[in-house]
Image: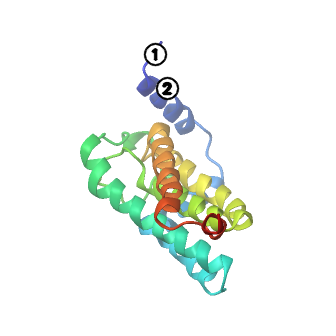
Amino acid sequence: MLHPRHWDALLFARVGRLPATPADRWLRRLSTTADHGKLWALIGAVFALRPGRPRRAAARGLGSMAVTSALVNAVVKRLFRRVRPDLVTASTERALRRAPHTSSFPSGHSASAAAFATGVALESPAAGALIAPLALGVGYSRVHVGVHYPGDVLAGMALGCGVALASRHWRPLIGDRAQ
């Protein structure tokens, strides 16, 4: 049986060999829009303008994202220190203007995206369903622009989902409180 890093490198190489399309520019923009949680903060701010379920969804999503981001960047990346993929493989249409300098594992962008989307979905399943494709797009974009291996993205998403789900322990959902 082959090592998971073999599959990681194989998938990464296959994505890198995809032909150039107009989607390259949009995926690069999506990736950079999610830098430092800006995309999720904007969506959360829009949700927070409405009282009730949307505001609770914003609070849980942004809180989950903040905890996840701190955990990934202050702890997990320092433990694993995985070297990022060689940026030479990324075409100029795909490559980011500035290469990230942190370690590759796990993907912080993917972790934040999954934490926000899962946190929102816990409070508002309909809103979470609308945000989930965007979160998945952010994760894929990190592989597409050549700064993460697919395993980095999957691990980040798993970590983000886990933190959001654990938030039920510290702040129960409205339905959980009634039981």
Q: Against 25, is 143 above or below? A: above
The residue at the far top in this view is: 1
Q: Position of residue 111 (x, y in %)?
A: 47, 54
Find disc 2 in the rendering and name its residue: 7
Q: Image point 30% across, 40% down: which residue?
A: 83
Identity of the amino acid at label 2? Trp
| Residue 146 makes an appearance in the image | yes
Q: Earlier in the sequence, mark 2 or mark 1?
A: 1
Q: Against 22, is 49 above or below? A: below
Find disc 1 in the rendering and name its residue: 2
What is the CA distance from the residue labelled 2 to the residue labelled 1?
A: 8 Å
Query: Do callouts 2 and 1 mark residues in contact (Cβ within 8 Å)?
Result: yes
| Residue 99 makes an appearance in the image | no
Answer with left or right where residue 88 lies relative to residue 168. left
Q: Image point 56% across, 81% down: which residue?
A: 45
Q: Against 62, is 2 above or below? A: above
Which quadrant does the C terminus fall into?
A: bottom right
Answer with left or right where residue 130 lies relative to residue 150. right
Q: Secondary structure at mark 1?
A: loop
- Compare residues 81 and 66 and report the one nearer the observer: 66
